[in-house]
Amino acid sequence: MRCPFCAHDDSQVKDSRPTEDATAIRRRRQCSSCGARFTTFERVQLREIVVVKSDDASGEPRREPFDRAKIEQSVTLACRKRGIGRDQIDRLASGVQRQVETSGETEVPSRVIGELVMEGLRQLDSVAYIRFASVYRAFNEARDFEEFAGTVRDVGVN
């Protein structure tokens, strides 16, 4: 594993243990060159997944590899200052990734992933759910927030 600090190609595993939800192995490593310590995660990948995104400009869909980090980043942003722990965000991202990988499809529309993230956030935190929805569904006016928040109350989300 390449050191993220000095780019040396050799590091030693100092400690390995499963993550809290047992979906990955957390490894503490130490660079044999500079001595820096860093953490890596090893996850099972069932198949290569391609995300199909609709490109409004040309009308042609774009394809890109599935990137779990994008889900984590979006969820982290939606959950900002909500008291939601890193482990909860990681579990949500793992759940979405697992659902996408076990769907049996090699190409998954981005809207399917977005809906899976929305469902996970709906169960986790109503404010984070509304924040994510406002970007995902491109709210343009305050009325859009009001209408969507009304549906959240109807669902009974905390």
Image (cartoon, rainbow, N blue to C red):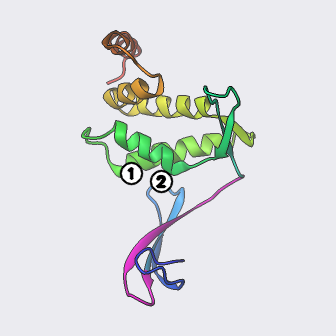
Look at 37% across and 17% down and name the residue there: 156
Q: Amino acid at mark 1?
A: Asp
Residue 87: give its label: 1
The picture places residue 19, in percent across and down from the top left corner, at: 46, 60
Foreground of the two, 30 or 119: 30
Quarter occupied by residue 123:
top left
Magenta residue span:
30-47
The picture places residue 136, in percent across and down from the top left corner, at: 47, 27
Foreground of the two, 71 or 121: 71
10 Å neighbourhood of mark 1: few (<14), some, or many (≥20)?
Answer: few
Judge whether residue 113 is colored magenta: no
Q: Earlier in the sequence, mark 2 or mark 1?
A: 2
The picture places residue 155, in percent across and down from the top left corner, at: 41, 15
Foreground of the two, 108 or 139: 139
The picture places residue 47, in percent across and down from the top left corner, at: 72, 52
Residue 13: give its label: none
In three-dimensional space, the C-alpha distance between marks 2 and 1, rounded to whole angstroms, equals: 8 Å
Judge whether residue 31 is colored magenta: yes
Tag 2 and tag 1, C-beta contact below 8 Å:
yes
Residue 21: give its label: 2
